Amino acid sequence: MVGLSDLPLRDDLRGKKPYGAPMDPVTYALNVNENTHPVPPAVREAIVKKIAQSLETINRYPDREFTALREALARYASRSHRQEALDASMVWAANGSNEVIQQVLQAFGGQGRSVLGFPPSYSMHPIIAESTGTTWSVGSRESDFSLTPAGVESAIRLTSPDVVFLCAPNNPTGTPVSLETIEAAYDATDGMVMVDEAYVEFHPEGSPTASELLPGRERLLISRTMSKAFAFAGARVGYLLADPAAIDALRLVRLPYHLSGITQAAALGALEHADVMLAMVDDIRLQRDRLLRELPKLGFTVCESQANFVLFGGIENPQKLFTDLLEHDILIRDVGIDHHLRVTAGTEEEISFFLETLGRLSR
Ligand SMILES: *Cc1c(COP(=O)(O)O)cnc(C)c1O
């Protein structure tokens, strides 16, 4: 059998592991922070119509600048933005925010450059750093997983990164990041600061987002996604808010026509029904708060969360609990933090089943 080691692979990729969230077929999939509510049939029909329209010109390459989609995303992002509306020149998109993040490192990282992250955080950040040849540096968090302006500043001084990644709220801990911390990071570096706001829609109502810091900060990038609150993970659409100059940098590294006509049409259809797509966010927040309330009653510790998942601890043997839950048709996530597991806030029924099962197992 031929293995990877037999191929002339790049030296820096030897021995690396691919991203590998398990994809076991289970009834209760609470492991990758999707919105577990399916897209309502009326919106699915509207999306099908859009896709059908796009097929009329599918013999041609799609709009390379995906102008209509950038305009729709700008309108959508402006809803939660408490300042002057964002316009399309400040919006970029790609096949999932993972691709956006990859483009950011292709443009601003790469050989001889470094990116600073604060683990435990999103597992794809170091993987994308590796695949783009960018050195991965780490700073530390407080014991409750939070970040402080002083802590972030000192990590930046120590490592002099070309790019800083902040995940707000942080995956897998759920921890919020204050605007003061983001500002402190920006002021401490001459490099790019990327705030990964994949879970921004789950913030408490009316709380600020990093987009408010954009005016006058051309090195600030904010990545978002339609994969989580927007219930559109399978369509693969992520986007970025930034100064138009930073977006010009991404045009240098994107592949031509990277967003297919079908993807653009589907995303436009979904964005036209943003209110319906987001209708379940309030319920998901309730289920998250229910997890935060109920897990301690079962003897677990929980981390403050502003996302659609909860990291819970005090688990003697996480691998065993993970497997026991899997035997009961529930898939959650072992994120590799000692004595902890992470669970996605799903539907009321899913969380009831999860809590009941967990209660029986831990007793
Ligand atoms: C889920 C997630 C993403 C989303 O990735 P997509 O490629 O848009 O599906 C990005 N960042 C974080 C922190 C995530 O948890």
Image (spheres, helix red, strand yellow):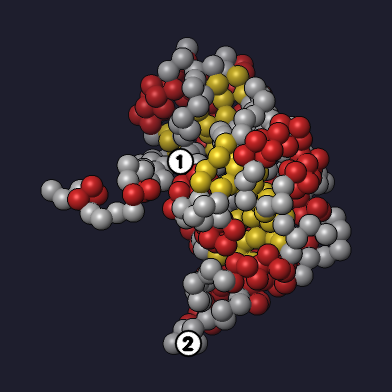
| Label 1, ligand 1: CB separation under 8 Å | no
How many C-alpha atoms fall within 10 Å of the one at disc 1: few (<14), some, or many (≥20)?
Answer: many
Q: Position of residue 177 (x, y in %)?
A: 72, 38
In this rendering, the answer to whether 118 lies above or below 111 is above
Mark pair 2, 1: CA separation: 38 Å
Q: Which mark is residue 269?
A: none
Q: Please tell me which residue lies in front, 80 or 176.
A: 176
- Residue identified by numbered label 1: 29
User: Would you say 199 lies left or right of 137 here?
Assistant: right
What residue is at 57 percent from the left and 29 percent from the top? 311
Q: Please tell me which residue lies in front, 182 or 8.
A: 8
How many C-alpha atoms fall within 10 Å of the one at disc 2: few (<14), some, or many (≥20)?
Answer: few
User: Would you say 13 lies left or right of 117 here?
Assistant: left
Q: Amino acid at mark 2?
A: Arg
Q: Position of residue 350 (x, y in %)?
A: 52, 36
Q: Position of residue 239 (x, y in %)?
A: 62, 61
Earlier in the chain: of badge 2 and badge 1, it is 1
Identity of the residue furthest to the left in this view: 1
Callout 1 secondary element: strand
Choose mark 2 or mark 1, whichever is in front.
2
What residue is at 57 percent from the left and 14 percent from the top? 299
Q: Amino acid at mark 1?
A: Ala
In this rendering, the answer to whether 321 lies above or below 350 is above
Res 295 → quadrant: top right
- Residue identified by numbered label 2: 60
Q: Position of residue 129 (x, y in %)?
A: 50, 49
